[in-house]
Image (tube, rainbow, N blue to C red):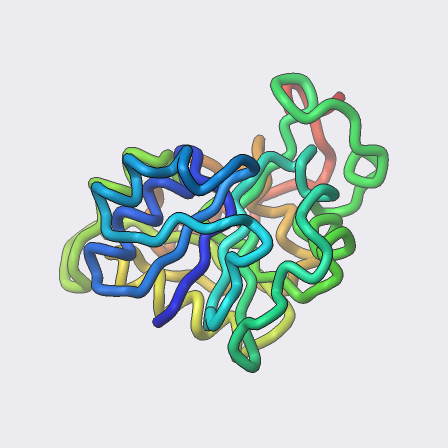
């Protein structure tokens, strides 16, 4: 699969490494120039490109940038993508730690619903609640007892199926977490966030989530 990754931080860099290991054709971009990604590109064999070119020919684009930077994603960033390109949002809203106040999210909008509204394209929510080192190192085969599971939320069933298959390929079970409106169940502060649960544990944690933002996860 041809994959574009917009963002080269902890999760973006990790997905670049893992997806290249699996043989996918990966392009990666950040908010600066391709030259700043020389080391990652050399290490992995991924192509470093400008952000505006991240989707060229891509079957799947992963947006993995700070929430506060989502409005600055280049307009038409999917130009040149393959038909029916799937867009994945890995982001989290950290108002106190990084992003500042985003009123719509504070007022109850699910993070990825807000991201979708900013990007103007349908997105699938995944990879937001696992530590980058665990994503890099803790994938296992399907027969492994206690295999870590990742929730996947979204409204497009076909796109969700593509992402769930990719999660499995990376070494994790994929759990259907419902619609994008329900993706608040996997936001920071929820029982599933950062918990490294197996599939039954993820389903139970999603069912116990409450929508109110509290503590460190609230501006």
Q: Is residue 215 above or below residue 145?
A: above
Residue at image location 35% in from the left, 59% down from the top: 26
User: On the rendered structure, is 198 left or right of 184?
Assistant: left
Residue at image location 56% in from the left, 79% down from the top: 84
Tell me the quarter of the image containing the N terminus. Answer: bottom left
User: On the rendered structure, is 216 left or right of 166?
Assistant: right
Q: Nearest the camera: 47 or 170?
A: 47
Residue 179 position in % (x across, y down): 64, 64
Residue 161 position in % (x across, y down): 45, 74
User: On the rendered structure, is 151 left or right of 92?
Assistant: left
Q: Nearest the camera: 203 or 152?
A: 152
Q: Is residue 177 visible?
A: no
Q: Nearest the camera: 213 or 118?
A: 118
Residue 205 position in % (x across, y down): 49, 45
The number of discs equals 0
Residue at image location 31% in from the left, 64% down from the top: 25
Q: Is residue 137 above or below residue 75?
A: above
Tell me the quarter of the image containing the C terminus. Answer: top right
Q: Is residue 41 visible?
A: yes
Q: Is residue 96 above or below residue 187?
A: above
User: On the rendered structure, is 11 left or right of 21?
Assistant: right
Residue 123 position in % (x across, y down): 62, 62
Residue at image location 68% in from the left, 26% down from the top: 99
């Amino acid at each position: 699969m041809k994959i574009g990754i917009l963002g080269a931080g902890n999760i973006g860099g990790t997905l670049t490494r893992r997806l290249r290991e699996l043989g996918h054709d990966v392009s990666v971009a950040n908010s600066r120039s391709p030259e700043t990604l020389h080391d990652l590109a050399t290490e992995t064999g991924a192509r470093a490109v400008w952000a505006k070119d991240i989707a060229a020919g891509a079957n799947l684009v992963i947006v993995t940038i700070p929430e506060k930077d989502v409005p600055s994603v280049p307009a038409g960033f999917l130009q040149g993508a393959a038909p029916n390109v799937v867009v994945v949002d890995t982001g989290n809203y950290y108002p106190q730690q990084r992003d500042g106040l985003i009123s719509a999210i504070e007022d109850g909008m699910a993070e990825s619903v807000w991201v979708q509204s900013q990007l103007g394209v349908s997105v699938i929510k995944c990879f937001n609640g696992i530590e980058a080192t665990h994503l890099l190192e803790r994938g296992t085969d399907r027969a492994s007892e206690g295999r870590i599971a990742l929730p996947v939320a979204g409204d497009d069933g076909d796109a969700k199926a593509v992402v769930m298959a990719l999660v499995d390929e990376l070494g994790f079970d994929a759990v259907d977490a419902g619609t994008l409106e329900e993706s608040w169940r996997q936001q920071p502060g929820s029982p599933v966030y950062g918990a490294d649960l197996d599939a039954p544990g993820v389903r139970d944690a999603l069912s116990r989530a409450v929508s109110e933002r509290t503590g460190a996860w609230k501006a």
